[in-house]
């Protein structure tokens, strides 16, 4: 019997393990027979009810932490879309027929996201195995009892260590984000252009603070760049700050983007953690209405012409920083543009998704850009983020620059589309 012919409701009910399906609001959506058996509850007592109304902590035990730990795990799965295996828990359960009588129970829970077609978390699968009898084993097996007691103690200690690590990671993430914000202020020259910049950190992860953007105004031209440092956290933020500053300085004296990236490549070779960084630079010549671009292993910028035609600027791509031969100059290409065209630079967090080819993300980018290209840059930037980032957030941070290609002297006039 193959996929469509399988009665998955019957499979769910027949599973030997105790499984419950919860909404992201932690309300029971369904439970299988094994779950009813070990919980001592009927389906009517569970389905449609809030988890912790049915199973609160034992009020007679001031040290009870089962409810708090389970809630934290489920909320983490709902927020991140990632599976969470919990340490062994003591979570006493009230006797269903004798209110106020609590039974000492031990559980081994695993919480797993059930994803909707759009990648958002639709339900939470809560699987539990009761190990009360193992923990409370009796019958002269003193060594076994000691080992079981040690197992429980070590599991509790491991959970406490994991919680401390999560708090430490959260603090480092917050510091790194503040550092990122300080090093990526909205460029002052945005007021001279119809432009928008965005930075979105990865959701619920330390994989943040390696992306940057930059705009540099020069006589008759503007240099725009984005880059992505491999790594995460404070170290990546520090490397990012150095590379962003170096490329900004190089762009002020270079003949074009390829030379600016050549200089950045030489500089990056002496910066620990800068290897394999990707970057792309575009020089906009306002007089000749041409773009010069060069890429160091970075996703291609997108140029949307006034008629909605989108072109990916992928004709001058070379390896990431530190990976090209010392003697080789990076390639550079030119293309023309008409007033009112839109240039979009971004980092890979915008177009990459798990288990999806990057070409799918690039197609999603070009389609969204073509459909909304007449929007103002701020509105267009928000649409791109809304349409391209997964509903649960990206696992990588994202930098984005949207620039309406009109000379700075004409940037104040509204675009007629």
Image (cartoon, grey):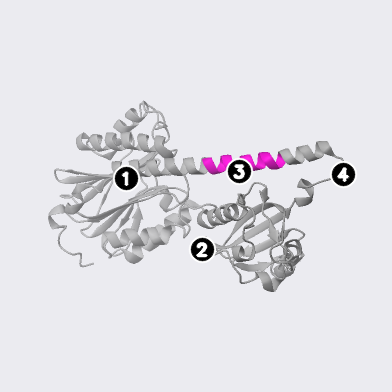
In the drawing, what numbered circle is on residue 181?
Answer: 1
Q: Closer to the camera: disc 4 or disc 1?
A: 4
Q: How many marks?
A: 4
**SS at circle 4:** loop
**SS at circle 2:** loop
Closer to us: 111 or 113: 111
What range is drawn magenta here? 151-164
Q: Which residue is mark 2?
A: 118
Along the polypeptide, which appears first: circle 4 or circle 2? 2
In the drawing, what numbered circle is on residue 159?
Answer: 3
Badge 3 vs badge 2, beta-carbon distance below 8 Å: no
- Magenta stretch encompasses residue 154: yes
Q: Closer to the camera: disc 2 or disc 1?
A: 1
Q: Residues within 10 Å of mark 2 (few under 14, many from 20)?
A: few
Q: What residue is drawn where x is 21% and y is 46%? A: 222
Between the residue at mark 3 and the residue at mark 1, the CA separation in whole angstroms equals 33 Å
Between the residue at mark 3 and the residue at mark 2, the CA separation in whole angstroms equals 32 Å
Along the polypeptide, which appears first: circle 3 or circle 1? 3
């Amino acid at each position: 019997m193959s996929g469509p012919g399988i009665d998955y409701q019957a499979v769910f009910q027949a599973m030997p393990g105790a499984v419950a399906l919860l909404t992201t609001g932690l309300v029971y959506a369904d439970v299988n027979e094994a779950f009813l058996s070990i919980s001592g509850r009927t389906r009517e007592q569970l389905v449609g009810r809030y988890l912790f109304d049915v199973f609160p902590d034992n009020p007679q035990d001031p040290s009870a932490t089962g409810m708090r730990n389970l809630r934290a795990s489920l909320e983490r799965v709902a927020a991140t879309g990632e599976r969470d295996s919990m340490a062994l828990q003591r979570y006493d359960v009230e006797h269903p027929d004798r209110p106020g009588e609590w039974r000492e129970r031990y559980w081994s829970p695993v919480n797993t996201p059930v994803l909707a077609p759009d990648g958002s978390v639709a339900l939470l699968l809560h699987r539990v195995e009761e190990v009360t009898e193992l923990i409370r084993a009796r019958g002269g097996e003193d060594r076994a009892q000691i080992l079981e007691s040690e197992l429980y103690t070590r599991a509790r200690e491991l959970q406490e260590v994991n919680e401390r690590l999560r708090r430490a990671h959260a603090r480092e993430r917050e510091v790194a984000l503040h550092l990122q914000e300080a090093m990526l202020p909205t460029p002052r020259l945005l007021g001279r252009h119809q432009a928008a910049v965005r930075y979105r950190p990865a959701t619920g992860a330390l994989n943040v603070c390696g992306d940057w953007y930059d705009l540099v105004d020069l006589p008759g031209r503007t240099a725009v760049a984005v880059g992505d440092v491999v790594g995460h956290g404070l170290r990546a933020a520090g490397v990012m700050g150095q590379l962003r500053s170096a490329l900004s300085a190089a762009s002020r004296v270079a003949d074009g983007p390829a030379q600016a990236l050549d200089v950045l490549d030489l500089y990056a070779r002496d910066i620990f953690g800068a290897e394999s960084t990707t970057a792309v630079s575009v020089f906009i010549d306002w007089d000749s209405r041409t773009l010069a671009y060069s890429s160091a292993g970075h996703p291609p910028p997108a140029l949307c012409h006034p008629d909605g035609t989108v072109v990916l600027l992928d004709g001058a791509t070379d390896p990431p920083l530190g990976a090209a031969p010392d003697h080789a100059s990076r390639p550079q290409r030119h293309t023309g543009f008409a007033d009112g065209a839109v240039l979009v630079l971004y980092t890979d967090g915008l177009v990459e998704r798990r288990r999806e080819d990057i070409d799918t993300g690039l197609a999603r980018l070009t389609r969204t850009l073509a459909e909304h290209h007449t929007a103002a840059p701020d509105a267009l930037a928000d649409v791109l983020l809304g349409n391209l980032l997964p509903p649960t957030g990206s696992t990588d941070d994202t930098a984005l620059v949207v620039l309406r290609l009109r000379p700075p002297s004409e940037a104040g006039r509204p675009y007629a589309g």
